[in-house]
Image (cartoon, rainbow, N blue to C red):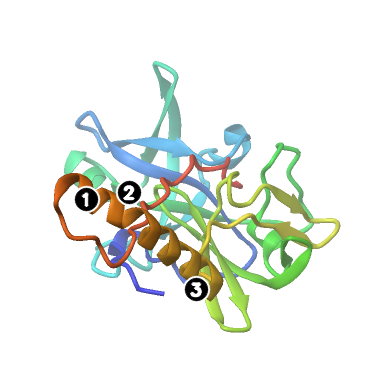
Amino acid sequence: MASAFVSTWLIPISKNETQLRVGRLTKAHGLKGAIKLELFTDDPERRFVPGAVFTLQVPTTSPWHGKTLELAELRWYNGHPVGFFVGVPDRTAAESLAKAILWIDHDMSETTDEEDAWFDHQLVGLAVIRDGVRIGTMTQIDHLSAQDLLHVSTETGEVLVPFVKAIVPSVDVAGGTITVTPPPGLFEELPAADTDDAALDADETAPDAAAADGAPAADDAEVEPTAAPDSAKPAE
């Protein structure tokens, strides 16, 4: 698979499996160091209390790399959460934290009651199933700005699977499985039979098209890429 450029903002931090992603700092608010938040938890009253300490996921070039952030106060403005943090006195400091992802320590025995939401440690190690056959094991989750990505270890290598409902329709933690319905080519090259059929179709239709407009027939048929579906609700 071809590798894609990934912004340094999206490189996951080195963390242990007892940490949870609970929020992301989006942009500065006002002049006194406040920062708007995107919450990844349905329990902000418990996660975002004064004195709560967060591990930061930021680029290695950030002045905040390797540091923690302590919450001084959480307020709500027009229905949106805004945080004030220790050591962030002004807008300049707040802007340096934009896009940072917040992680907290987590009790491994805790579960979530939210529908279609799971903690990372609940998914790691589950068998990945396609058409009733095991094709790999889920080994890691990357939490990116657009959507989460599941790392699936297969016999031929690692595959990154977008964690969206159209591709991952079912997660059965109790049964130990993740069911996937991937588009063609995500886990392997298209079968030779499919390629031959496509070429045959192109050969049958190309002469008619060429006769119609006087253009030479194309040798290969192009396949339009499928648009990515909306993201499923991310786990806390």
Residue 131 x/y as whole percent: 74, 60
In the image: residue 37, left or right of residue 149: left
Tag 1 or tag 3, which sits nearer the N-term?
Answer: 3
Nearer mark to the viewer, of 3 and 1: 1
Residue at numbered disc 3? 189
Residue drawn at point x = 71 percent, y = 56 percent: 179
Work out whether residue 96 can be spotted.
Answer: no
Give the SS element for disc 2: loop
Q: Position of residue 167 (x, y in %)?
A: 59, 51
Which residue carries the number 2 mark? 99
Of residues 39 and 54, the one drawn nearer to the viewer in this rendering: 39
Q: In this view, does 164 lie to the left or right of 175?
A: left
Image point 29% across, 64% down: which residue?
8
Mark closer to the chain start, 2 or 3:
2
Asked if residue 199 shows in the view, the reply is: yes
What residue appears at the point 40 percent right and 36 percent down from the top-left corner?
A: 37
91 vs 188: above or below? above
In terms of secondary structure, where does tag 3 sit? loop
Quadrant of the drawing holding the N terminus: bottom left
Judging depth in this view, the residue of 130 and 114 nearest the camera is 130
Q: Give the residue furthest to the top.
A: 78
- Corner quadrant of residue 17: bottom right
Q: In which quarter of the image is residue 121?
A: bottom right
The structure residue drawn at horizontal position 79% and vertical position 62%, both measured from the top left corner, is 132
Q: Which amino acid does label 1 sit on?
A: Ala
Q: In this view, does 7 lie above or below 1?
A: above
Circle 3: residue type: Glu
Q: Is label 2 or label 3 in front?
A: 3
Q: Name the residue under label 1.
A: 211
